[in-house]
Image (cartoon, rainbow, N blue to C red):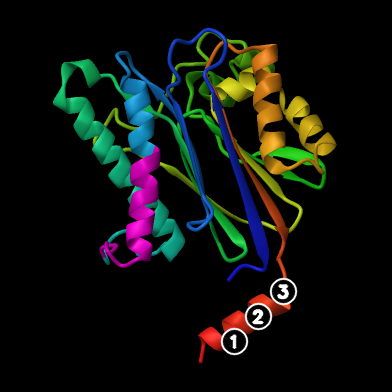
Amino acid sequence: MSSFDIEFAAVTDIGKIREKNEDNVLISSDLGLGVVADGMGGHSAGEIASNIAVSVLAETIRKINTNQLKIPENFLPKLDLTERKLLMAANLANAAIYSTAQSSDIYRMMGTTLTGILFDGDFATAVHVGDSRLYLFRDKKIVQITTDHSLAMEHVRRGLLTRAEADHSKIQNVLTRAMGIKKNIEFDLLKFPVKIGDTLLLCSDGLYKGLSENDMGDILRKGNQLPIVKLCKQLVRVSNDKDGQDNISAVLIKILPAHKPTFKQRLKTFFSRK
């Protein structure tokens, strides 16, 4: 059991110039799950790929939780249950996208990014592939937790581009890893403790094309007292105003003090145990 409450919000917007929204977002407070996926490929293929990614991920986690699906004993036994659950769900989602991509020439080039986060106890576990991002806003500072799987960031790692140059590079949109392209892909898996006061932001690249990390940090600092849905909408709106060349999606998650049950709720719980 966790020692805090979690509040979720999700917003997705088509942006200013795209004809379709190929992003998909999903939040589930009962699963403790938040997901962003940014699809690619013509003929609505990107939209389908990102939809499969978020829906299969959530459905698999739900089935494992309710014992409708078992994790094979030999599936990454050294990892903990939450990590194995999240990776198995991501692998099944990738297999579903790959299978759909192989079924028709129209869908042959379909793919999607995926950044998802699952809460268990006082920890968050993230699964990630592509250039969508997960940020942690803690103690008034914002930090990118995930690493972009893009050619631009590969060049940054090799010292060929600065981070600022990469953000405006023509190769920024070239992914080195994505779901649906291969039968088996490698996901990044990240586990870290969370604490009361933390805010987590998952987003597609459309959001950070319009907002620098400083911009995001400013909005989160100033909007600290706003309802989470309003704050999430504000991030997307400001990014759209500043850029808007792509679909824009954000999932915002706040870690709050545990809600104390009222006397009436405690009484109800007491009698339901009898």
Please report the residue visible at 52 percent of the width from the left and 84 percent of the height from the top.
272
Which residue lies under the disc numbered 3?
262
Work out how far the residue at label 2 is from the one at label 3, CA to CA, in angstroms.
Answer: 6 Å
Q: Which of 174 and 274 is in front in this view?
A: 274
Q: What residue type is labelled 2?
A: Arg
What residue sits right under mark 1 in the picture?
270
Residue 116 to residue 124: above or below: above
Residue at image x 61%, y 42%?
A: 9
Q: Return the residue found at the far bottom.
A: 274
Give the CA separation, mark 1 to mark 3: 12 Å
Of the 4 image quadrants, the one containing the N terminus is bottom right
Q: Is residue 59 magenta?
A: yes
Span colored in magenta: 54-72
**Circles 2 and 3: CB atoms closer than 8 Å:** yes
* Magenta segment, prevailing SS (helix, strand or loop): helix
The location of residue 148, given as percent across then percent down, is 53, 30
Q: Can residue 193 be seen in this view?
A: yes
Picture quarter containing residue 54? top left
Q: Is residue 144 above or below residue 69?
A: above
Question: Pointer 2 and pointer 1: residues touching (CB < 8 Å)?
Answer: yes
- Numbered mark located on residue 235 in the image: none
Q: Find residue 146 and report its horizontal and vertical position in percent.
A: 57, 38
**Amino acid carrying mark 1 in the image:** Phe
Q: What residue type is labelled 3?
A: Thr
| Numbered disc 3: secondary structure | loop
The residue furthest left is 103
From where the camera sits, is residue 76 visible?
no
Q: Identify residue for label 2.
A: 266
Tell me: 271 left or right of 135: left
What is the quadrant of residue 207 in the picture?
A: top right
Residue 23's place in the image compared with 161, above or below, is below
Q: Is mark 2 on a helix, strand or loop?
A: helix
